Amino acid sequence: VAYGGAGGGAGSAIGREPLTKLLFSATLTRSAARLAPLRLERAAYFCVSGARFATPATLREWMLSCGAQDKPLLLLLLLRWMKAPQAKRYWDAPPGGGDGGADGEGGSESGSESGSESGAASGEEEGEGSESGSSREGESEDGIAAEESEGEGGARARRKHSCVLIFTSSVEATRRLAKLLQLLGVSAREYSSAVPAKLRHDTLHAMRIGTAGVVVASDAMARGIDADTIDAVVNYDPPSDIRSYLHRVGRTARAGRKGTSYTILSDSEARPFKQMMAKAGKEWRPLKLPQQRTALAETSPLLDDALSQLPATLVR
């Protein structure tokens, strides 16, 4: 969205061309009181999309759901699945082996075979379809898995250096999740106001050159991140409102590049989130990982062990 206008003032009084101001924003306010301090004269409003809360056409948005206690595990499985969607038993990936899901190794194998295989397994395991809601009609789980494997997985394999950015709702939650992922074998970095400025600078630099892997960030840091290596954004905690959602997912699929966002919802979070998306006129597209229920059950001992170690790691 662009908001522009021309202002004269002292510049035009001495024969100079009037100053032109351009304001670009994904969530531009329509409040006259907030726009007044900009001192825009003969302002013109340009909207690049018909929808007020539009996201780029190159951004694919998915929603996953599970029980509240399973969210850390579902995040872990999602990171592994993004790294190698063709893996038949992806949850058996050894911890500490770079389960960041960012470098895309392994994604060069055949995606069609993996997609049909994983999708069929998911259908047999769960015996149910995903909730449709405002999602697109005719999308089966196996279709989603196959499409994601062939498209996103292939692109990620070709691009070896990329980043997965995970958002939480608070500084405390950011630190806790980053530490928990590290205990689960993911090389995750913490990016929040609680982190020293030098470490934040180092993380931002690593993101920009494509060596960051997985970064866990607080909601307040969403607007300050600009790196073209971010291939995926994960909303671990749902955003508080649609503007916050747009700022988060807007960290990927920038300047015409492709990107993917995933929102992980507990049972209690799903309904408010879907209502927020519907009110904004945005679709929500459900995604269930292959054999998700079995995978969560088989990896639960990993989470129990990590949670037992977490208090010690949180002590500064």
Image (cartoon, helix red, strand yellow):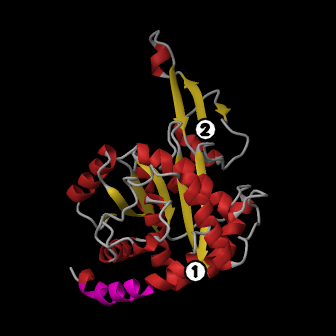
- Residue 34 screen position, x and y as percent: 58, 47
Mark 1: few, some, or many residues within 10 Å (few <14, many ≥20)?
some
Mark toward the viewer: 2 or 1:
1
Residue 17 in magenta?
no
Element class at badge 1: helix
Q: Is residue 34 above or below residue 169?
A: above
Quarter holding the C terminus is: bottom left
Q: In this view, does 22 lie above or below 276?
A: above
In the image, what residue type sits under mark 2?
Val
**Which residue occupies 70% across, 55% down?**
282
Quarter holding the N terminus is: top right
Where residue 209 sits, quadrant-wise, is: top left
In the image, what residue type sits under mark 1?
Arg
Q: Earlier in the sequence, mark 2 or mark 1?
A: 2
| CA gap, disc 2 and disc 1 | 42 Å
- Name the residue carrying label 2: 1
Element class at badge 2: loop
- Residue 231 screen position, x and y as percent: 46, 50
- Name the residue carrying label 1: 293
